Image (cartoon, grey):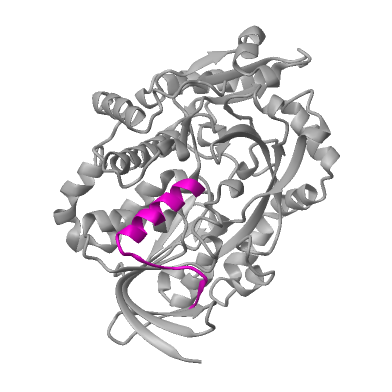
């Protein structure tokens, strides 16, 4: 077995949306950077970023109720919704820049206009939704949101959901037409096509086996070339670990202190996909409900119109599941091998704290198709078994760590970047809203890891993302300009509603 050693400036591990975004940003900021990518699968965007491994994409906090929490005094905390929406605006601006510069073509291949809706039943939930609507609709980021508790109006908005529904309890919905559906698999592939044209060295069927610090402060990445069976050694000043659930093991191998006392809890997902075009044609929205009492936030039920391969699809879910794998293509030993002496106490504490979650996941795994259809019929009363198929989605690994407010072994929801103190390595962990906030998250990586270049790079960042460093909530005129220009560039304002 031969080994060769190659030097590069930047190594990106994993060919998903995060590496694609970081690589594209860095190439725009410094075209002479030598970037090398390693992906163990045969092509880009096949794991967490793949369109069939995500059910609800285009997270802008327009309809996800778990981003707006009711406080003990009855008021609604919208701070997380504002943060996520502003992050999504960064993504929209960056994608528009790429389209305007002709670095990416045919934006309708990856983004389509689609109303985002929240739907609740029961007097208490209707009251909550009304308060949420009042809190959000006063904010410029959520301009254009409508509320209705009139069943006749709801039949106009969501005919499939309202058809044959018994009016036995109050029902209400909010609707905002400026939502989108984003196909991150298609976008990831487009970005890697662009990076290839920029002479980025992209290596598929290459599995990263190890990562260690060299005596001169660089990083040595040991890679198995799965085609030839040879082992390669690559040296870089900066490494980004964007390998989805696989990032945790590589972070641990790096040995950086910031990666200690961190664990991961894998959650798998199952969706129902509609196979009847006549039924799919009756629905045109992302409709999010409220998680059942005792269910984790990642299990919020939603019925989503999706555009995949330029065809209209419809997915319902997610039903949570459990697998010890950290990736869909991972190993059954992923969870057990992630437990180390430095995170054992953290993991044990998480196990004790999350017994209800474990019981919930076991119950979900045991559901029959009939039971899943019964849950679907709470959304679509006349759903027929033969119109729906089960689809196994991607794996998500929720971060477990010790926090000041949550104590030992706290299960973190969301996306988290772990960075070495000197900024020479960064690893992305966690799950939703993930891909939708990729641009902001990768800009934060650049700020932390390339601080010596920020003065030089800031004008270019502002060219790509005009709102960089500015609060859009406090600058409604800039927000209005951005909404108009991104909608025009990405084709969101002129697409005829042939699908509705």
Q: Nearer the viewer, residue 2 or 148?
A: 2
Q: Residue at x 52, y 81 (%)?
A: 228
In the rendered image, which quarter is residue 499 located in? top right
Q: Is residue 161 above or below residue 407?
A: above
Q: Residue furthest bottom?
A: 1
Identity of the residue drawn at 33% across and 64% down: 200
In the image, which residues are magenta? 185-209
Query: Residue 143 location, x and y as percent?
Result: 39, 20
Which quadrant of the structure image shows residue 125? top right
Q: Residue at x 37, y 53 (%)?
A: 21
In the rendered image, residue 168 lying in the magenta stretch gets the answer no
Q: How many marks?
A: 0
Q: Inspect this view and state whether residue 170 appears.
A: yes
Above or below — where is 192 with respect to 302?
Answer: below
Query: From the viewer's perspective, is 278 left or right of 456?
Result: right
Can residue 447 be seen in the rendering of this structure?
Answer: no
State the image coordinates of residue 58 (x, y, percent, origin top left): 48, 38
């Amino acid at each position: 077995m031969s080994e060769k050693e190659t030097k590069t400036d930047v190594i990106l591990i994993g060919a998903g949306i995060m590496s694609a975004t970081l690589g594209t940003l860095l190439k725009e900021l410094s075209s002479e950077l030598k970037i090398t990518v390693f992906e163990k699968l045969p092509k880009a965007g096949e794991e967490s970023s793949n369109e069939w491994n995500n059910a609800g994409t285009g997270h802008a906090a327009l309809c996800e109720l778990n981003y707006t929490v009711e406080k003990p005094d009855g008021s609604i905390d919208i701070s997380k919704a504002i943060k996520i929406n502003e992050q999504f605006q960064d993504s929209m601006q960056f994608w528009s820049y790429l389209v305007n510069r002709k670095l990416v073509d045919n934006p309708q291949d990856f983004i389509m206009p689609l109303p985002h809706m929240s739907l609740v039943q029961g007097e208490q939930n209707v009251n909550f939704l009304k308060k949420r609507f009042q809190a959000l609709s006063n904010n410029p980021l959520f301009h254009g949101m409508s509320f209705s508790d009139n069943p006749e109006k709801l039949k106009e908005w969501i005919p499939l959901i309202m058809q044959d529904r018994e009016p036995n309890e109050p029902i209400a919905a909010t609707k905002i037409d400026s939502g989108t559906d984003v196909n991150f698999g298609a976008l990831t592939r487009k970005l890697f096509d662009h990076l290839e044209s920029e002479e980025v060295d992209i290596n598929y069927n290459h599995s990263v086996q190890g990562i260690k610090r060299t005596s001169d402060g660089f990083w040595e990445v040991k890679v198995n070339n799965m085609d030839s069976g040879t082992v390669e050694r690559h040296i870089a000043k900066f490494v980004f670990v964007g390998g989805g659930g696989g990032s945790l093991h590589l972070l641990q191998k790096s040995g950086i202190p910031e990666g200690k006392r961190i664990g991961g809890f894998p959650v798998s997902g199952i969706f129902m996909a509609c196979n009847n075009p006549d039924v799919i044609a009756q629905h045109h929205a992302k409709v999010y409900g409220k998680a059942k009492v005792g269910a984790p936030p990642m299990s919020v039920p939603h019925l989503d119109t999706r555009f995949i391969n330029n065809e209209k699809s419809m997915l319902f879910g997610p039903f949570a599941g459990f697998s010890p794998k950290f990736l869909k293509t991972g190993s059954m030993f992923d969870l057990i091998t992630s437990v180390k002496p430095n995170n054992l106490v953290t993991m044990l504490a998480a196990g004790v704290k999350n017994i209800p979650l474990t019981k919930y996941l076991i119950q979900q795994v045991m559901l029959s198709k009939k039971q899943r259809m019964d849950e679907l019929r709470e959304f679509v009363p006349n759903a027929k078994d033969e119109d729906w198929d089960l689809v196994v989605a991607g794996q998500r690994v929720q971060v477990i760590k010790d926090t000041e407010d949550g104590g030992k072994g706290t299960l973190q929801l969301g996306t988290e970047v772990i960075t070495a103190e000197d900024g020479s390595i960064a690893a992305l962990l966690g799950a939703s809203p993930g891909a939708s906030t990729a641009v902001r998250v990768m800009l934060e990586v650049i700020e932390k890891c390339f601080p010596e270049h920020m003065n030089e790079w800031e004008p270019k960042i502002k060219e790509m993302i005009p709102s960089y460093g500015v609060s859009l909530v406090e600058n409604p005129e800039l927000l209005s300009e951005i909404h108009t220009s991104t909608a025009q560039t990405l084709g969101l304002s002129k697409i005829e509603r042939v699908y509705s």
